[in-house]
Amino acid sequence: MDSTEPLLARLTMDVDAPPRRGGVVPPGDGGGGDDGGGHGRPPSPPPSPSRLHPSVGRTLTTHLFAEAQKQVHQLEEGVHFSTGEGMAGDSLMDLVTLLSAVTFSVKAVGSMVRRLGLPSRVGGPKTAREANVAANDTWIKALTASRACSLLVSEECEEPITVKDPGTGQYAVVFDPLTGLADPPTKDMGSIFGVFRQLTPGEDACLQDVLQPARQLVAAGYAVYGSATVLVLTTGQGSVDGFTLDPSLNEFVLTHPHIQVPFAGSTYSINEGYCASFDARTKQMLNTLKEEPTLADGDPRSCRYIGSMVPEVHRTLLYGGVFIYPAHAGRPNGRLKLLYEAGPLAFVTEQAGGQASTGSKPILDVQPESLHHRVPVFIGSEDDVSMCCAHFKTAPWGSGPKSDPMAILRRTHSIDACLRRSSSAARSVGSFGGRSPPRGVTLDEDIDGFVCAHLPVL
């Protein structure tokens, strides 16, 4: 198939067609696989129903209008309708317009990132700093021109930007125009954005309109600029969808409908270069991640870290695991900004069924104290985040998952699988389905594994 064929066409192909290997026609298709006497390969089974989601392949614009149509009859109290016509749901059209402006910004910045470092006559920025400034200008101009938002907060601006044109929508947008600005820049870069409702509709927007907990976001998402440009978006209805830019159409096409974060993953992402400046609880957490088998498959975890938050979180959403940026001696409050980095990504993660915490409380419940408020971050699968945060909470039985009886109980499956692999002489110990510890392992040497192996499998 021609590699230039639009992604939309490829996505709508019949994926259940009988496979053809090496150009050979399968028997039953009129080829030469059967000798006529019925002694050849059996006919291929009939194709099963397609497993593609029915909405896969539709464009982002179509998706936005479909989402607005679902909510058009839900009244939004206290929201200013920019058209002044008073129809319920009209502000949803403002939101669609705003998200369309976000889409334009992502396309423009993605194109610019691909030209990063090229000669100036080609039109590409020479340095990551120039790219960051250009990306910030692109986002501000596109959002302002949409006339759907009254306040903008950018990671690159010390103060909020107020849009005072009459008739503008009553939304406040927070965004980081370009992340992953290592020098040289990382292979994968990204953008993050979140949308709040203005707290004072009908009045001039002010700082308090964006100093809201991330749980009050109306929409949020991020873009990844890698081998393909991917936009992940949620409008807060419990659904997270991923769109991939088809260059031949210059349109975002739905490729990852209803993303769900796995309950547990097999990877963790953390910059271990700061290990010497971590406190005792963070070091203990790191050791637990390395030693404790994952609940996903019973295997030890592996570390994956590329130094760019958005691609790290994107991988975690798709495959599970945990992304960690804790506080340390050099950053006692953490490094990531709550309003336009940690907050929107936490909102997306929890909408997809994952968890996001500062170690002591959910990120979505943290009240921002300033535009550039920083927080520690633990984002990812529910089980992995819970295990990490257990080291920062004190219970009657102590801190850390190993002292928590429920944490031991929840890991029955993974410990049991680990023991089965490590001992060929493992035997059943009753109807609970547990396993005996391997030969040579005493109760003192493997207390957690021995206890878990004899607990009921839930």
Image (spheres, rainbow, N blue to C red):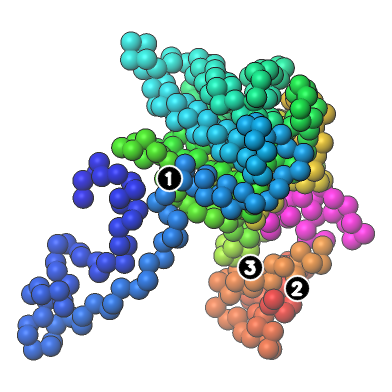
Q: Residue at x 75, y 67 (%)?
A: 408
- 378 on left or right of 307: right
Q: Which residue has dot 2 on it?
A: 451
Q: What's the amino acid at mark 2?
A: Val
**Residue 1: x and y, percent?**
21, 50
Q: Residue at x 68, y 88 (%)?
A: 431
**Element at label 2:** helix
**Residue 112: x and y, percent?**
43, 23
For this rendering, which residue is in front, 422 or 146? 146
Residue found at the very far front of the displayed protein: 85
- 78 on left or right of 42: right
**Residue 439: x and y, percent?**
64, 76
The answer to whether residue 65 of the structure is visible from this angle is: yes
Residue density around tag 1, few if under 14, some if 14–19, many if 20 or more, within 10 Å: some
- Quadrant containing the C terminus is bottom right
Total marks shown come to 3
Identify the mark nearer the N-term, 2 or 3.
3
Q: Residue at x 79, y 30 (%)?
A: 200
Residue density around tag 3, few if under 14, some if 14–19, many if 20 or more, within 10 Å: many
Identify the mark nearer the N-term, 2 or 1.
1
- 372 on left or right of 99: right
Give the numbered dot on residue 414.
3
Q: What's the amino acid at mark 1?
A: Thr
In this view, 118 is above or below 16: above
- For the record, the magenta segment spans 380-403
For this rendering, which residue is in front, 180 or 131? 131
Give the numbered dot on residue 59.
1
